[in-house]
Image (cartoon, rainbow, N blue to C red):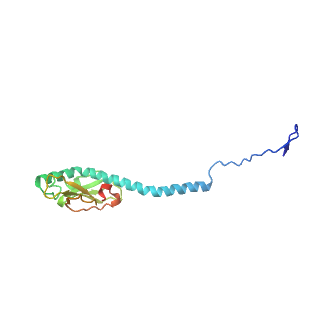
Amino acid sequence: MITDAATGIETVRSIKMKNESHGFTLIELMIVIAIIGILSTIALPSYQDRVIRAQVQEAFYLSEFAEKSVEDYYKVKRKLPGNNAAAGLPAPEKIIGNYVVSLQVEKGGTINIMLGNRVNKNIDGKVISLRPAIVEGSLKVPIAWVPGNASVPKGMIAKGKNNTTVLTRHLPMNCRY
């Protein structure tokens, strides 16, 4: 208590303690680091799967010209080609891209895309198949392409063999079911 000399009244003055923090405590920093670690373990696999799906999708773009060649062959010959030469395509190892090392037409018109080059290591050397689906006895109906493990459209018959070795989770949605 302090007494004011002029008035004689006693007053209580609080003495402010200078105990202010100028940073983070060790426990606060450890909590932040733990949260970042947990988030990264969840986010990284998801990000890698998205990158792989984008690379697989780009491989499909490369196959579009081969699909057209197989369709043209089918319209003219009334059967599906059994190899690249019959479909009017270069040798399989000559059809390459950023994520593709070969594109091969096999018996029944199946197009097999082998992934490689700058592709993610989880799908390097893996294959994605595109099978032609037709309506028997109707050459006017266009060919539907059945990618990967996708189901065949109702009323159509898929030709060729599915040689897909890419994990289902790495395939785009239209190739899964």
Residue 35 relative to residue 105: left or right:
right
The quadrant the C terminus occupies is bottom left
Give how far across and how far down residue 58 sits, in percent: 30, 51
Residue in front for this viewpoint, 176 or 51: 176
Give how far across and how far down residue 89 sits, in percent: 18, 52
| Corner quadrant of residue 80 | bottom left
- For image coordinates 22% across by 53% down, the residue present is 94
Residue 53 relative to residue 23: left or right:
left
Evaluate whether residue 45 shows in this view: yes
Residue 83 relative to residue 46: left or right:
left
- For image coordinates 21% across by 49% down, the residue present is 65
Residue 45 relative to residue 11: left or right:
left
- For image coordinates 62% across by 51% down, the residue present is 24
Query: Total label count?
Result: 0
Q: Residue furthest left?
A: 77
Residue in front for this viewpoint, 116 or 41: 41
Evaluate whether residue 88 shows in this view: no
Q: Residue furthest front?
A: 155
Give how far across and how far down residue 49 sits, in percent: 38, 56
